[in-house]
Amino acid sequence: MKNLSILLLLMATILSGCHRDTYGSSNKYITYMGRIDKSNPNYVSFAYPGVSIFAKFRGKSITARFKDLAGHGLHNTFYCIIDDGEPQKIVLDKGQYEYVLATRLKDTTHTVELVKLTESLVGEVRFFGFTVGDNSSDAFLIAPKALPKLKMEFVGNSLTCGYGNELSSMVPKVGFSPLNENNYLAYGAITARELNAQYVCTAYSGRGICRNYEGDTENTIPQFYGKTIATKSDSKWDPNEYIPDILVLNLGTNDFLAESTTKVRVDSIQFIAEYTAFIQRMRGYYPNAEIICAVGPALIETMEFYPNQLTRYSQCVLTAIKNAGGKENHIYYFETKPQEGPFGEDYHPTIATHKRMANELVSFIIENKLMKTEK
């Protein structure tokens, strides 16, 4: 009787027309943008903000399979965008594996985009793939639209991550919350969408060129840049995996902000030398890229310790650009206006400020005719 029951259950499943199809993370119809670790055949891993997953499917529903490795009670968050519609936020949870992205769609072709809003300090994410369809119609993945030809990369710290940008107050909340970080609405992502470019964000809050915000020198920007996952010491990134046409470096803010946390003035000679070396390293990786060294918008002239920070910072960056070859070597200086209130978390830029920064950067790129995919 037991075997007969199993047989009847199998027959009922077949007759009911179950059309849910599951696709693994390595499926050829799933496209990624950003630094992805594909070494495991069962899933892909990533941690940098802005990493995106694209797919196109036929069917009425779609789910995604994730594992959140966030620590210290934190949660990674994503935007889910169906058919280029309004983004919906998804908060991952360690106890959940499958996430419903859309149901009751029209029985036609749809697109899905998943964008990681949170940064590496929140934690790593593993993506296992999609399941499409229900019991009422056929469902399957199809070839997605090609990514834009123009490629951009943004390297930086919390400003580039979008730290705390979902808040807006004259008296900002103190302390980091991943729920208030939105890389999709950070200036880099906005700029890339405005210019119809691919977008890669290699950024980590609190990190500097020579020293970090707290004054330590562990996993600074030059150190984590070479990693697929910034928090893993054995993680190595091959720069040939993604060669940007436009590379934006927004570096050094934390080196100068550390003057208030450590009471130690920036060593300008060391800063210039290490910034110059990093630019030269980028030129070695990407010989044809237009490199933009951005300054702003967090530093101001009047600080409790060691004033004139913005002027000193700007002069150091300008000197590093000159040492690396300047405009003749396709290296440019860009300064965005200093921010004013209201502020996001911990006096970081709000979404409104990020949009203003993006507008300034887009204008700079167009005016300097930097949108070239071939040279």
Image: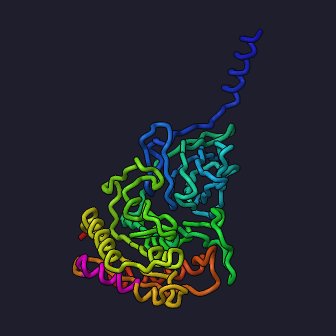
Q: Image check: 285 left or right of 198? A: left
- The percent position of residue 47, horizontal first and vertical second, equals 51, 54
Quarter of the image that includes the N terminus: top right
Q: Can the viewer see residue 189?
A: no
Residue visible at 53% across and 75% down?
261
Q: Nearer the viewer, residue 245 or 338?
A: 338
Vertical relation: 337 (above or below) 134? below
Quarter of the image that includes the C terminus: bottom left
The reply to whether the magenta stretch includes residue 13 is: no
Q: Image check: 8 left or right of 253? A: right
Q: Can the viewer see residue 56?
A: yes
The reply to whether the magenta stretch includes residue 317 is: yes
Vertical relation: 234 (above or below) 266? above
Vertical relation: 277 (above or below) 137? below
- The percent position of residue 282, horizontal first and vertical second, equals 30, 66
Residue visible at 53% across and 39% down?
23
Picture mark count: 0
Residue at the extreme right of the image, as rendered: 1
Q: Which stretch appears magenta?
A: 313-327
Q: Nearer the viewer, residue 229 or 42?
A: 229
Q: Quadrant of residue 320?
A: bottom left
Residue visible at 35% across and 71% down?
246
- The percent position of residue 115, horizontal first and vertical second, equals 55, 58
| Magenta segment, prevailing SS (helix, strand or loop) | helix
